[in-house]
Amino acid sequence: MNAPAPNDRPLDPELLPEPETVGAADTRAEAIAGAQLVHGLLDHLRHDDDDTQRARIASVMTTIEGEAKPIVLRRRFRMPAWPVASGLAAALLLVITVLVVLPTQRTALAVVRTSIEAARTASDRSYEVRVTRPGAEVVSEEATARIDLRDDDHMLIVARSPFGHRVVVGRDPHGAWAIRHDGTIDVYPPAHTRPRWIDFGQSTFLIDSVDSLLVALPDTYRLRLHAPAPLPDGGAAVYERVSAVREPRPSPDPRRIELWVDSATGLVERMELHWPRRPERGEGPRRGPGMREHPRPPRPHDGPPGPRPPRRGPGRPPHGPPPAFIDGRPDFDGDRHAPPPRMIVFERIDTEPFADDWFEPETHADE
């Protein structure tokens, strides 16, 4: 008779393993469970507002304070629930600490995200754009541009240079387009991004919509929430206030953005774009690392140095250098382009519903 195979031999009772006890492996499992709990709570709370977070934390703490029930392990071992409850309490304490230490960033982010969603479903609206010249301290009282918005596929910006030239950019369901100062219409294919900057001769203007700027805030700026406040030019109404500050690395984008958001509608009522002060072309030398020691000779398109010429309104012939679209990012430090404004202000204004063809380039080609 053949000997039994190794797997068929009877087991020696003395060689059987002892039943497992609650030890290092269980402790490690509890640690992993606690870490997963914290991760899940943090990920979930990131999308909640303050009231929802407080209600959820109060509910869980009430459960912890209730009568602890024993936990039955699969291997018929019983252990008191207090170690798990203590681990859960520690995890919740960590979550609460994070909420206390970082409430500003999370709440400011919630305000911005709410405003982004509100803009996508809002009705027709308009913003007036006013500019503070490079080196100046006072915002112009005359509008430099107007922005008309409906949704992601309908946008119109009509801007006028300090010398009276008119430039129009827009977007309709077919894509982005622009009308140059000479009336030429440029239509951009979907894969091509339209220019966002225009060199007006003495300053370079960022020509973009409030909605587009708002969408870029969470990924590129540090957000901070302030106490509700009225608009800078007064009024009884107060708005949610958010500041966005960009890291001081080389970029033509504004260093700081200020928001006033209507808490009832979620829409931006006012947006301010701030750049560090730079001298205007013709104002004087620009000194510093990588900058010129002496002012360069004026270029043909710079226009006359010194005070800004009077603005030319509709019906008056434009003069001075024509505006030029900039493909890509402007070069301010290398002095290839005029400096950005000191500040650009977008402020919401009353408007009537737009016609169906309002966002098509042909509607504005002959104005």
Image: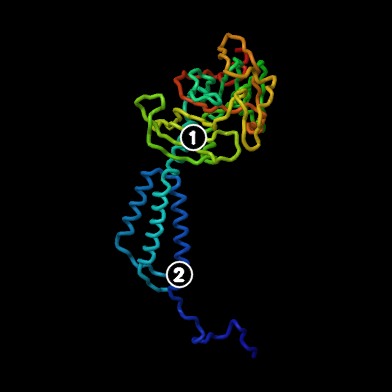
* Quarter of image, res 333: top right
Residue 79 seen from this side: yes
User: Is disc 2 placed on a helix, strand or loop?
Assistant: helix
Work out which residue is located at the far bottom of the displayed protein and give it.
Answer: 1
Tell me the crowding category of disc 1: few under 14, some 14 to 19, or many 20 or more residues within 10 angstroms, Cα based: many
Q: Quadrant of the C terminus?
A: top right
Which kind of residue does numbered mark 2 sit on? Answer: Asp
Q: Is residue 107 above or below residue 355?
A: below
Kindly identify which residue carries mark 2. Answer: 26
Work out which residue is located at the far front of the displayed protein and give it.
Answer: 294
Residue 258, image x, y percentages: 47, 33
Residue 134, image x, y percentages: 56, 26
Q: Quadrant of the N terminus?
A: bottom right
Relative to 36, 359 lies left or right: right
Contact (CB < 8 A) between labels 1 and 2?
no
Residue 116 has which mark? Answer: 1
Residue 171 seen from this side: no
